[in-house]
Amino acid sequence: MARDWQSLNEYRLFCRGRLADPYPLYHRLRAEDPVHWSRQADSWILTRYDDVRFALQHDPRLTAERLSLLLAQLPREVQAEVQPLRRLLSTWMQYYDPPDHTRLRSLVNRAFTPGTIERLRPRVEAIAEELLQPARAKGRLEVISDFAYPLPAIVIAELLGVPPEDRDRFKRWADDLTVFMEGVGADYPAIARRTNRSVLELTDYLGGLFDQRRRQPRADLISDLIAVEAEGDRLSQAELFGICSFLLEAGHETTTGLIGNGLLALLRHPDQLRKLQQNPASIAPAVEECLRYDGPIQRISRVVTTDFELRGKRLRRGQRIWAMQGAANRDPRQFPQPDRFDILRRNNRHVAFGYGVHHCLGAPLARIEGQIAFQALLRLPELRLENTAPEWQEGVSLRTPKSLPVRFRVS
């Protein structure tokens, strides 16, 4: 007899973004119903690695243009109120298909180069040390609020060229966008209204910053984006708003999750922690394993553009798909012993940063931030968890501990 997924409490918690450990559920869905229709999520849920990669790559049967489904969760009167929010999000690359996505990304790539990111390494190291300094005398650190959250937030603000005195406002705007993008909660209309107010403040602020950089360019990403041009094509003002706001939202929350989730995994697996401490050169594969084992992004959505069949299920035009990256990264068909945390894992072709044309633009920066963060944290002597079962943020897309207090020996 088929399992009644809709009646399972853990399944309901998962659909509401309140399941603390989704991986056992992923395993059962992947084995019993890998292309699963969820009435509660009003979406197809894909949990196998090959199916998730198929959904994430560009295919004419699927589209990334899914903003309307997110906004459709709001009452009509609220949708009418939040038009500035709609206009801003409609310029985000993640909602574009080729060729529009190709054009925009190629322009951004001219400014957001690997060389630009690599040159940030010394500054990221300095920020990490500055953030840890107050904790050294106390022997205690709240990793999320005092380190994992401010580190990428400061880095992205400096990269864009935001003055230090304005960082707190930037963090508030980014927080509001992140909460809205999760698309869950009974108070979603209130979240939308608050985010719309933040968008108005953000675009007003960025508009002033753009004007300043046009008059007097500096060595920052906003100046580079304004200057970028290819074959006579430039970024419009609306596209500049979209790129900067997207980098603001995506550029810190996912790295916070990488640092928090990764450190939790390392401290829960002392053999792997010792292995990394004894061989610091293994930091790069260790970060990749942290991303695979418990990545900060658990799913990306797509919309069906034409009816087609997948594993015997009929997907209909207009239906939404949840491509569960967290489930794909624990698929035993792709990863031997997928629930084993192994910092030296070989052939670790995870999809934590997506796949195909929409592969995360900021992945090189997130990797550098993760490497530096773990190296700095693991230099704290006798580092240990204060709470072995942390509470998790509510959400289906983002997976991050609410807090992660640790203790260490004062040297």
Image (cartoon, rainbow, N blue to C red):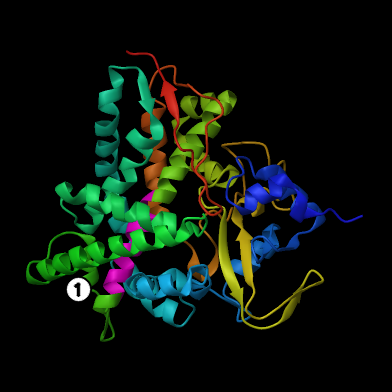
Image point (69%, 57%), residue name: 47
Instruction: Give me the residue at 75% from left, 59% from top.
Output: 34
Q: Is residue 168 magenta?
A: no
- The answer to which of 3 and 297 lies nearer the viewer is 3
Near-viewer residue (75 or 279): 75
In this orientation, does residue 302 appear?
yes
The outermost residue toward the right is 1
Residue 91 in view here: no
The quadrant the C terminus occupies is: top left
* Residue 350 horizontal/vertical position (percent): 59, 53
* Count of picture labels: 1
Which of the 4 image quadrants contains residue 303?
bottom right
Q: Over which residues does the magenta segment extend?
A: 239-252
Give the residue drawn at x 38%, y 22%. 380
Quadrant for the N terminus in the image: bottom right
Q: Residue 219 vs residue 336: left or right?
A: left
Question: Does 139 sit above or below residue 60?
Answer: above
Task: Report which quarter residue 312 is drawn in.
Answer: bottom right
Q: Amino acid at mark 1?
A: Ala
Q: Position of residue 68 (x, y in %)?
A: 49, 75
Circle 1 residue: 227
Q: Outermost residue, bottom direction? A: 232
Residue farthest left in this picture: 215
Locate residue 190, reporting x and y percent.
40, 58
**Residue 114: image location, x then y, percent:** 35, 58
